[in-house]
Amino acid sequence: MKKSLQILLTIIIVILTTLQFFINGSNIKNDMQYNIYDNQLNIKNKVEKNAKAVGWGGLAIQYFIFVHSDILQNKYISELKDSYLSTNTFNNQKNLISKQNIFYSSVVSSALLLSLYSTTDYNEFFAESVSKWQTFDDSIKNKSWEILNYFFLNIYKILKANTPGRLKDFNYIKNIIDEDFKKEESKSLIFHTNLEKPQTDLTYEDLYYVDDNFGMKNLYSYDYLYGFVPNVLDYSLNAWTYTLNNNSPQYSFKYSYKRYNSENIKPVLKKFNQESFNITELRKVK
């Protein structure tokens, strides 16, 4: 009897020890999974925090995209700009004309990034650019991604090391980008805005859109789309005229995008003295 009790106790101890081993193993596995997730979250938050802290980052990327595009040769965008200048009255038109590249850079950088959220301010433009650069699948890395990749690998690290905090003189950034554009590798990266056909074979399905009506082809709101064209053109006008109407630096500019339909698009059309926007021409900016 005594021997039987000893055997029974031994079996119970073995079972309890085995259970404890599996419980500890499960806890270790859960801890490891939590730590992996926590580390990934910390990295993501760190990138976003750094992006938010860089007041000049969005401006720098927009100017870089402008330099690496042929937007100045886009006749329709220039016609819209000229129509705006000729049909509106300004206190200092000469100063406005001198800043017209802000309009061009706002249009083309938005067309490249394809994110209305990035128009809310320059910090968000920077954050959205970082996100697109880091998260694009290899299978859909197109000219847009190549341009962002070149910026972060070759330009941003120089700017970050030499432009701490808020921007005081944008010419410093401009000169670095302009000087880099003299290199053959840099000059070969151009975002075209005058093509009859896309610069890529990627379809809207490849890019995870529900149909082909996105970006500079999207005029009105439906489903998750807000009317990309009127938002971008209105955003670009407001960015262009911001420092003339406000006693604030350019990087302080903010914008609120909205849903557009055939009625509330009319004020935007009026600014450009247009009856309608030519989607056939705008879709070339892609």
Image (spheres, rainbow, N blue to C red):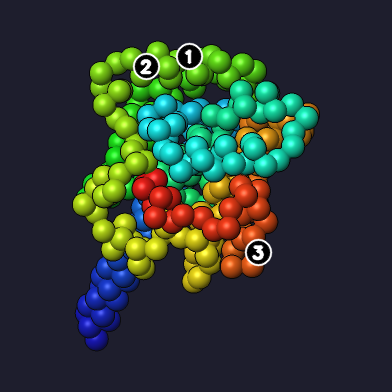
Q: Quadrant of residue 67?
A: top left
| 216 versus 59 height, above or below | below
Residue 163: image location, x then y, percent = 55, 18
Q: Tell me the distance, in whole angstroms, between the alpha carbons under discs 3 and 1.
A: 40 Å
- Residue at image location 30% in from the left, 36% down from the top: 146
Residue 4: image location, x then y, percent = 22, 83
Of labels 2 and 1, earlier in sequence is 1
Q: Tell me the distance, in whole angstroms, between the alpha carbons under discs 2 and 1.
A: 8 Å
Instruction: Report the amino acid beneath label 2.
Output: Asp
For disc 3, the marked residue is 264
Farthest bottom residue in view: 1
Q: Is residue 125 visible?
A: no
Give neighbour class at mark 1: few <14, some 14-19, many 20+ (Cα, 10 Å).
few
Of labels 2 and 3, earlier in sequence is 2
Q: Quadrant of residue 147?
A: top left
- Residue at image location 40% in from the left, 22% down from the top: 155
Give neighbour class at mark 3: few <14, some 14-19, many 20+ (Cα, 10 Å).
few
For disc 1, the marked residue is 175
